[in-house]
Image (cartoon, rainbow, N blue to C red):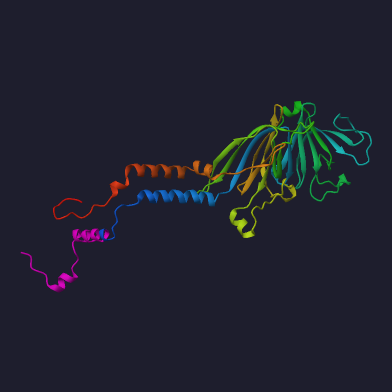
Amino acid sequence: MTPALSDREAATSVPPLGARLALSWNWLQRLRIRTVPIGLVCLLTLLLTLIGSYVWPGKQSYVVDVETRAVEFVFDGSEFSTWYLKAAVICVRSRSGGKARGLRHPACAPQAFQVYPLKAAEFRWPKEARILARWSSSEGVAIEVLAPGEAIDALTPANSPLQIEGLPVGSGSRILIDAETWQDHPVLPFSAKSLTLGRLPTTGEEGVLRSGRYQIRETLPGRSSAVTVEDGQFYPGDRINFERTTTWLERIKTWSKEKTACVKPCDPAKAEENEASGFVAPARHGLTVVAYTPLEHRRMRVDRPGADPSFVEVRWTSRAIRDPLLVALTALTGAFGLAFPSRALRLRRPRSAGGLNK
């Protein structure tokens, strides 16, 4: 027979496990808790994730692949802008005029240019060099030098920082690659401060964009690697460039509804140091341009004739649909909702004296 405990021993002894559980159950009943809101917790978690994806968007990188008949660059001076020309004709703008030297070319008036043949030349575009490359069935690829580089005096082309095989190539000079040579020409890489794809369709304009597509890659919340969150296609005649944008937090700090590093239309002089990188490759009827923008807060601007500019940005719905973590969370929420309905989690009331639940 177990001896009885004294009053002091009974006060200091630990109650058995069953007694502790009974006390906890009675405490919950006093709080009148009837259901465990697991579904509500999962729903709130999902909503907070969606709000977080919308309020704190990641940095975007645009990938475009287009076929166009005109593209304009402002180079950043990096080694990635080194070009190898298989064969070309250089028309150097002549200040004093005179007759063409060596040969003539129908695209270069002898009163305005000195014409030189060129074979197997390699050179790097200097910083701030601005060019417009066009394709036409009659001339092939014509590269017009709009500005050869920094600190240029247009009246003294001999001081131009752009030298091709010892020839000073100043503003207004042209580099011509015939159509046959272009079809078998190596790719031309670029790293640009500013990039404009296509020209707006106007009377006599041939340098329009013909077709293309794009992808937007973004770093999602909690991840370091970028994933594709949106894609689409371009229409013939679109003109495309990129603009850096600010987040809503930066806009609140500056009390500005919209603030970009580029004015509209984008001013190359105010563009970022590296807006896009990629390469130019031969196409059957033009230029294939593949470009990548760095991971930044940017948007893509698309101009069309007779319409206001449109801006391509990531929508929070696209970000949510393409987020594998969010999709998995949604699936788990639905599974929990089906497997554990609220009635199944209802706590039992204490039994009555008759032993029946009420």
Q: Is residue 159 visible?
A: yes
Is 286 on the left-hand or right-hand side of 47?
right
Q: Which residues are magenta?
A: 1-28
Quadrant where the N terminus sits is bottom left
Is 214 on the left-hand or right-hand side of 6?
right
Seen at 59% across and 46% down, the residue is 60
Seen at 80% across and 33% down, the residue is 176
Q: Is residue 221 visible?
A: no
Q: Position of residue 180 (x, y in %)?
A: 75, 25
- Does the magenta stretch mainly form a helix, a strand or a loop? helix
Q: Is residue 25 magenta?
A: yes
Q: Position of residue 162 (x, y in %)?
A: 80, 44
Q: Is residue 4 magenta?
A: yes
Q: State the residue in front, 57 or 90.
A: 57
Q: State the residue in front, 328 or 77.
A: 328
Quadrant of the rendered image containing residue 215: top right
Q: State the residue in front, 124 or 208.
A: 208
Quadrant of the rendered image containing residue 115: top right
